Image: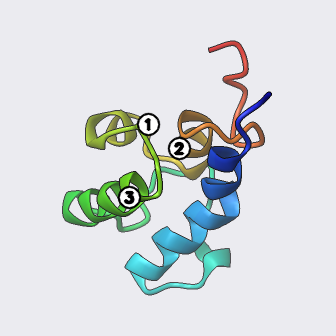
Amino acid sequence: MADTAGQQTFALERLARDVADLLYVEVGEIDPDESLIDQGLDSIRLMALVETWRGDGAEAGFVELAERPTLRAWAALLGHPSGASRAGR
């Protein structure tokens, strides 16, 4: 049986909403393929996201997310299949 709870919890839409809330912008202003660092995310806000997401069951940590700072990469890392093409990993 596939674990779909994590996939639903960390869908691209949810990640975009969480980041947009922290950056005080509209969800549509966040480009899922552009570096979130370039879009205004800093390390303190990233740490806040990691703590929130760990509370919801995420296993990825700060370093993993910081190394690939795009929403699409995060969705793949956090287990949502529509996030990116990491299906083989």
Please identify the quarter of the rendering in which residue 17 is found.
bottom right
Query: Are the two marked residues, 2 and 1, in contact with CB atoms closer than 8 angstroms?
Result: yes
Between 84 and 80, the one nearer to me in the picture: 80
What x and y, as percent, mark residue 49?
36, 61
**Res. 55 mark:** 3
Give the alpha-carbon distance from disc 1 to disc 3, as whole Å.
21 Å
Mark 1 Cα shell of 10 Å, populated few (<14), some (14-19), many (≥20) = some
Nearest to viewer (mark 2 / mark 3): 3
Residue at left offset 80%, top offset 27%: 1
Q: Seen from this angle, which residue lies furthest front?
A: 1
Quick check: 16 above or below 82?
A: below
Give the alpha-carbon distance from disc 2 to disc 1, as whole Å.
7 Å
Three-letter residue code for mark 3 = Gly
Give the alpha-carbon distance from disc 2 to disc 3, as whole Å.
16 Å
Three-letter residue code for mark 2 = Trp
Mark 2 Cα shell of 10 Å, populated few (<14), some (14-19), many (≥20) = many
Residue at left offset 27%, top offset 36%: 63
Nearest to viewer (mark 2 / mark 1): 2
Between 55 and 73, the one nearer to me in the picture: 55
Q: Seen from this angle, which residue lies furthest left?
A: 44
- Judged from the image, the secondary structure of the residue bearing numbered disc 1 is loop
For label 1, the residue is 68
Nearest to viewer (mark 1 / mark 3): 3
Quick check: 6 above or below 44?
A: above
Q: Seen from this angle, which residue lies furthest top?
A: 88
